[in-house]
Amino acid sequence: MSTAKPTPPRFDASFKEGFAELVRWRRDVRRFRRDPVAPELIEHLLALAAHAPSVGFCQPWRFVLVESAVRRAAVIENFRSANQAALAGYDGERRALYAGLKLEGLTQAPVHLAVCADEGAATGHRLGRATMPETLRYSVVAAIQTFWLAARAEGLGVGWVSILDPLAVCRQLELPSDWTLIAYLCVGWPEEEHDDPELERHGWEARLEQSVIEPLKR
Ligand SMILES: Cc1cc2nc3c(=O)[nH]c(=O)nc-3n(C[C@H](O)[C@H](O)[C@H](O)COP(=O)(O)O)c2cc1C
């Protein structure tokens, strides 16, 4: 057995610049070309996502590729009714603005990925979860963010759809009873690329001033 340790990488200035660009150009994408994405590329991205941090190293993420046309149609219908209900919660100008937003790319995206938390995961031996059980789900979000950045580095777009009845999605996908839905992701080649959020471009919300995120000191 080899005892040689891998040499830690040094991230040079050009890598750091590239990484900052990646962060700035990662976007939530809802407009996809229909061209397929190679399954090996998705596998590669999922393998990277599995390097995300997780509470107690419990690795609770479960990725479900939704390929059946029938199941996809059920999720699209699920979105339509959830979105109608969400629209009903707004009035006046905000309602008109909401109605004009494109909030998913379910019909065009070549890849649908349901990302779940295995609430019954025995891995990690409950470390950290006794005090903050929600950290199990946070760990799945960490994997999603890793996937999102890795996908963008490959030129792929990712769109997070949360306007869904999550229990109905679990039923529609026949998921194990102790899995919860954390995200339903649309993945594919973007039709357009932007360095600003779609919700900002369409007047829904503005980016906060830098001063707002200055750390408070105690
Ligand atoms: C937890 C979560 C849920 C989201 N759900 C939706 C959604 O249902 N529909 C949508 O259009 N965007 C959704 N988004 C994307 C946000 O709208 C988007 O991240 C935000 O507007 C900022 O844009 P950006 O991701 O391009 O920077 C979601 C993002 C997060 C983190």
Image (cartoon, rainbow, N blue to C red):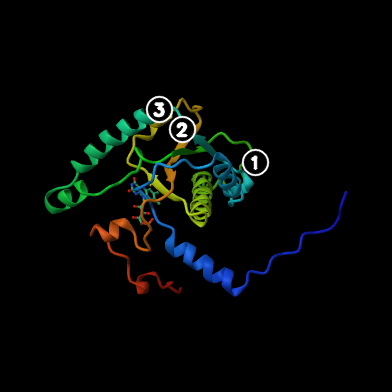
* Distance from Cα at disc 3 to Cα at disc 2: 8 Å
Seen in the image, is 25 located left or right of residue 79? right
- Residue linked to disc 2: 66
Instruction: Judge whether residue 128 can be spotted in this image.
Output: no
Q: Which amino acid, mark 1?
A: His
Residue drawn at x 36%, y 55% is 192
Front residue of 169 and 99: 99
Q: Is residue 70 above or below residue 125?
A: above
Residue drawn at x 61%, y 43% is 58
Determine the secondary structure under disc 2.
loop
Return the x and y of residue 35 as percentages of the image width and height. 43, 42
Seen in the image, is 111 located left or right of residue 125? left
Residue that sits furthest to the left in the current view: 92
Can you tell which of label 1 and label 2 is closer to the viewer?
2
Q: Which of disc 2 and disc 1 is earlier in sequence?
A: 2
Return the x and y of residue 79 as percentages of the image width and height. 31, 36
Residue 166 numbered mark, or none: none
Return the x and y of residue 57 as percentages of the image width and height. 63, 47
Residue drawn at x 77%, y 59% is 6
Residue 69 numbered mark, or none: 3
Seen in the image, is 15 located left or right of residue 141? right
Residue 125 numbered mark, or none: 1
Determine the secondary structure under disc 1.
loop
* Distance from Cα at disc 1 to Cα at disc 2: 30 Å
Residue that sits furthest to the front in the current view: 35
Front residue of 128 and 33: 33
